[in-house]
Image: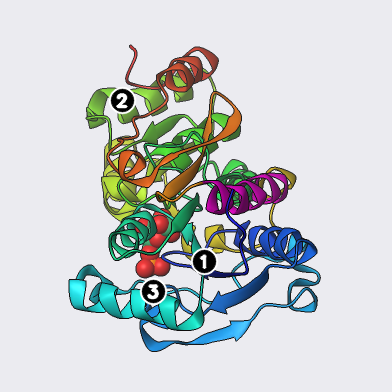
Amino acid sequence: MKTLKRIGILTSGGDAPGMNPCIRAIVRAATAEGISCIGIRRGYAGLINSDIFELSNSAVDGLTKQGGTILYTARCDEFRQEEYQKKGAATCKHLGLDGVIALGGDGTFRGAEALSRQGVMVVGVPATIDNDMGCTEYTLGFDTACNTALDAIDKLRDTGQSHERVSVVEVMGRNAGHLALYTGLAAGASAVLLPERPVNFEKDVLEVIRRGCIRGRRHHIVVIAEGVGHATTYAKRIQDATGIEARVTVLGYIQRGGVPSARDRASAGLMGVHALDCLRRYDEAQAVVIQKGDIAHLPLHEANGMVRSLDETMSTICNRVDGSWYWDR
Ligand code: F6P
C-alpha cells in the first residue's frame, strides 16, 4: 500500500450524469484520509496547460444531484501526440501528484493509458451515456440518459397517439446501439434500429407498422440510434410507403444533462472510492469496471483492448415482449 498525499482528478470527452457525484465521492474519501485533491479543468487540455485548482471538501458540496461536471470537459486532439503527453506528465510531476483519476469513455481511457506510459499512475473511471466500453457492464450516465430518453418518448407517445402518427425518435450513442436498445425495450417501441444490426427496412420496419395497423394500432414509436443514420431519412421513407404521417424528434444533448439517477449516484460513489483504492494499491494503471454486477478493476491496457457487443439476451427479450423487433424473426 502506498501513502498518497496529493491526487489529480479530471473529466474528459462527453459529459455524463454521475461525473459530479463521482468527483464528490473521491474528494470526500480522499480528504478524510488527509489526501489533498487537485481538480484539472477541461480534461487533458487542462493537464497540458496546468489549468488546475484545489478541490476542497466544500468545493464538492451538493454535487450528488448535479449533472455535468464542475471540472469542465473537452476532447483534446493534441493529447494524441507524445509531445503533449510528456507535457501532461511534466505537469503531474511539477504538482507532485501521486496519481490521477480520469473519468470518461474510450477516448479518455486511451489518453489515460498514454499518460501512464509517461510514468504517471492513472486510474480510469468509466463515464459515458453510451455504455459502449468493452471492459465494463456499466458506465456512469447511462441510466440517467435512458430515463431522460424514456421520459421524452412517453410524451411523444401522447401526441403521436392523438394524431395517429409514427414518432421516429433518434437517440445518441455514437456508433453503438446500447442506449437505443435499452430505451426501446423500456418504451415498448414498434421497431428499434441499431448500428450493430443490418436492417431490412421493408420487412423490419414497414411490415411491422402495417401489421400493427391491421391489429388496430394507430400510432407507432420507432427508435433510431444515431449511428444508423438520420432519422429524417427514415421518417420520410415510412411516410411515403405507409401513408401514415411520420414526425421526427432528435433527442440530442438533453440526454447528457439532468439530475443523475439513483443508480448513477450510487455507482459514482462506488466507482470513485474504488478508484482511490486502486491508486493506493497499484503501480500499474488500472480501470475501474463493473463485471458480473460487481465493482472490480483490471489493468488499463487490458481494459482498452476489450470490445463491447450488443446485449443478446436483451434483444431476444425485446423481441418476445413486443413481437415485432426484427433481428430474431
Ligand atoms: O459519447 C457521448 C456522446 O454524447 C455520443 O452519444 C455522441 O455521439 C457524442 O458524444 C457527441 O459528441 P459531442 O459532444 O462532441 O458533439
- Counting residues from the start of the chain, the first of labels 3 and 2 encountered is 3
On whether residue 155 falls in the magenta region, the answer is: no
Upstream in sequence: badge 3 or badge 1: 3
Query: Of circles 1 and 2, which is in front?
Result: 1
Q: Which residue is mark 2?
A: 204
Give the residue at mark 1: 98
- Residue 117's place in the image compared with 90, above or below, is above
- Asked if one can make out residue 266 in the rendered structure from this viewpoint, the answer is yes
Quarter holding ligand 1: bottom left
Tell me if residue 272 is in the magenta stretch.
Answer: yes
Alpha carbon separation for disc pair 3 and 1? 17 Å
Q: CA distance from mark 1 to mark 2?
A: 54 Å
Task: Please name the residue shown 35% across and 71% down the image.
Answer: 75
Decide: is 75 above or below 108: below
**What number is the disc on residue 44?**
3
Q: Whole-percent x and y of residue 148?
A: 62, 52
- Element marked by disc 1: loop
Q: Where is residue 236 drawn, in percent x and y?
A: 29, 50
Corner quadrant of residue 308: top left
- Amino acid type, callout 1: Asp
The residue lying toward the viewer, choosing from 41 and 27, is 27
User: Magenta region: which residues?
Assistant: 265-281
